[in-house]
């Protein structure tokens, strides 16, 4: 039973503590659009997206007005395009252009799924699509791309890792005049989930329904505000407070997902519990960790605080919804989090500390600007390190780094909007080139043998 206190508390969360629904994402399968003729395939894709998602934005806006809940983004995820392009051959950038055109037609903020899944090797269409990513991101506005290069079951495809270092670098070089937007819309995964509603890593997995509604909640400010009311509590009470708060946040997400699903006549998929920060003051995951007792994010103890936060968010969320999925935890994108930005500026937070934190949080090294002269081999090695954490720990990890062409450690790069600003973080220049050049596949760990 919902009482008056619960209603007033939710209103306060929205008005004073930055509670929002970060995204309603409609997943759309394009498997039935595959065609040996690339132009026919593109026509089918455009028609299907425009038909399925024609009311997505309007529905989201109506829910916002009726319930008073901010819904920041309306998005689409599609079947990994490498699967579709395998049937047609040809230039995959044609698919990127038609996806971008469809995204603009229906009015969504982003469309994810210019993707390939190559954890165990390259299938038909995979390598061709991956090599087209820099061009695709340079000539489109709303397309996001991802590549899964490893998993606990398959190990790590080091040939793909080597290639992705080059692709990240090339994506930055091709979008210098567009604010380095290329690598900011490119994520390299290990253990990528099929139902992630968050960009830039969203795609519609092969095992998903023909279309589905997934919702991503947010609310770091709400969690921080709750902790500020118990300044002298012990750690057990801190964990309980986070759990209770996550429950309330998730119930809001569940409501929005249910209503959107009914109105769009599309099945409800999952609620992603991730605490996704923004550059806005009061909407920071780093500030939650500091509220727990750290002088600044990056200090000794940061990884333990993040582990507590991530676990408590999951425990609270699964009590609020029977359909939890995606990434579900705490994001730590440097440029998108006001507290992370401050910690990086003061050098308290290093890329090595961030890597340690990724062992216990939702994703990985996210929205980190690195010196523009960082070599492709070093970027590949960063990807390999992060994938190893995900593979061994049976969790999703990812890398989204931005080589700031023409800039060096200590300077800053401005992305604007949701992407914020990032101090350029120092990266070790000791060469991993020989290791990366070996290629092959890192075998799956022993814990993969669960059958």
Image (cartoon, helix red, strand yellow):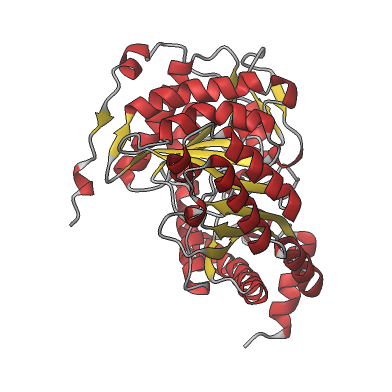
Q: Is residue 178 left or right of residue 400?
A: right
Viewed as shown, does residue 422 lie left or right of 434? right
The relative height of residue 347 versus residue 144 in the rendered view (above or below) is above
Give the image location of residue 241, x and y in percent.
56, 65
Between 102 and 26, the one nearer to me in the picture:
102
Residue 296 appears anywhere in the view: no
**Residue 411, quarter of picture:** top right
Quarter of the figure that contains the N terminus: bottom right
- The residue under the point 55% across, 65% down is 212
Residue 238 shows in this picture: yes
In percent of the image, x 72 and y 26: which residue is there?
179
Q: Nearer the viewer, residue 246 or 440?
A: 440
Q: Nearer the viewer, residue 57 or 132?
A: 132
Q: Which residue is located at x 73 percent, y 78 percent?
A: 7
Q: Quadrant of the C terminus?
A: bottom left
Figure check: 261 above or below 156: below
Question: Residue 52 placed where, x, y %?
Answer: 64, 63
Where residue 67 sits in the image (x, y, percent)? 76, 73
Q: Residue at x 33, y 48 (%)?
A: 394
Q: Residue at the bottom extreme?
A: 1
Q: Is residue 160 above or below residue 445?
A: above
């Amino acid at each position: 039973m919902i009482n008056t206190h619960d209603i007033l508390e939710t209103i306060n969360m929205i008005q004073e503590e930055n509670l929002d629904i970060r995204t309603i994402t409609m997943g759309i399968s394009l498997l039935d659009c595959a065609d040996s003729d690339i132009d026919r395939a593109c026509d089918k894709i455009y028609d299907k997206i425009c038909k399925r998602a024609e009311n997505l934005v309007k529905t989201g806006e109506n829910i916002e007005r009726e319930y008073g809940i901010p819904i920041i983004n309306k998005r689409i995820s599609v079947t990994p395009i490498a699967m579709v392009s395998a049937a047609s051959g040809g230039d995959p950038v044609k698919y990127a252009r038609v996806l971008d055109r469809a995204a603009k037609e229906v009015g969504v903020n982003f469309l994810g799924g210019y993707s390939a899944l190559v954890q165990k090797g390259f299938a038909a269409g995979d390598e061709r699509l991956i090599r087209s990513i820099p061009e695709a991101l340079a000539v489109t506005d709303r397309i996001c791309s991802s590549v899964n290069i490893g998993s606990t079951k398959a190990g790590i495809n080091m040939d793909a890792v080597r290639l992705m270092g080059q692709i990240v670098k090339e994506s930055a070089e091709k979008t210098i005049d567009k604010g380095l937007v290329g690598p900011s819309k490119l994520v390299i995964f290990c253990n990528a989930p099929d139902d992630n509603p968050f960009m830039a890593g969203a795609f519609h997995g092969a095992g998903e329904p023909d279309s589905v509604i997934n919702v991503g909640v947010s609310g770091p400010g709400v969690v921080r505000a709750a902790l500020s009311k118990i300044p002298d509590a012990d750690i057990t009470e801190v964990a309980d407070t986070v759990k209770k708060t996550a429950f309330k946040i998730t119930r809001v997400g569940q409501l929005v997902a249910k209503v959107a699903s009914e109105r769009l006549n599309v099945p409800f998929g999952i609620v992603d519990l991730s605490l996704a920060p923004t550059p806005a003051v009061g909407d920071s995951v780093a500030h939650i960790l500091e509220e727990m007792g750290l002088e600044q994010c990056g200090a000794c103890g940061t990884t333990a605080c993040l582990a507590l936060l991530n676990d408590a968010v999951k425990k609270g969320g699964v009590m609020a919804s029977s359909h939890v999925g995606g990434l579900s935890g705490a994001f730590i994108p440097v440029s998108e989090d006001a507290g992370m930005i401050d910690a990086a500026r003061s050098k308290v937070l290093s890329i090595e500390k961030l890597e340690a934190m990724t062992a216990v949080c939702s994703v990985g090294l996210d929205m980190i600007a690195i010196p523009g002269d960082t070599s492709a081999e070093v970027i590949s090695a960063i990807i390999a390190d992060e994938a190893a954490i995900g593979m061994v720990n049976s969790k999703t990890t990812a890398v989204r780094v931005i080589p700031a062409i023409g800039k060096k450690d200590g300077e800053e790069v401005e992305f604007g909007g949701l992407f914020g600003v990032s101090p350029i973080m120092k990266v070790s220049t000791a060469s991993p080139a020989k290791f990366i050049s070996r290629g092959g596949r890192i075998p799956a760990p022993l814990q993969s043998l669960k059958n």
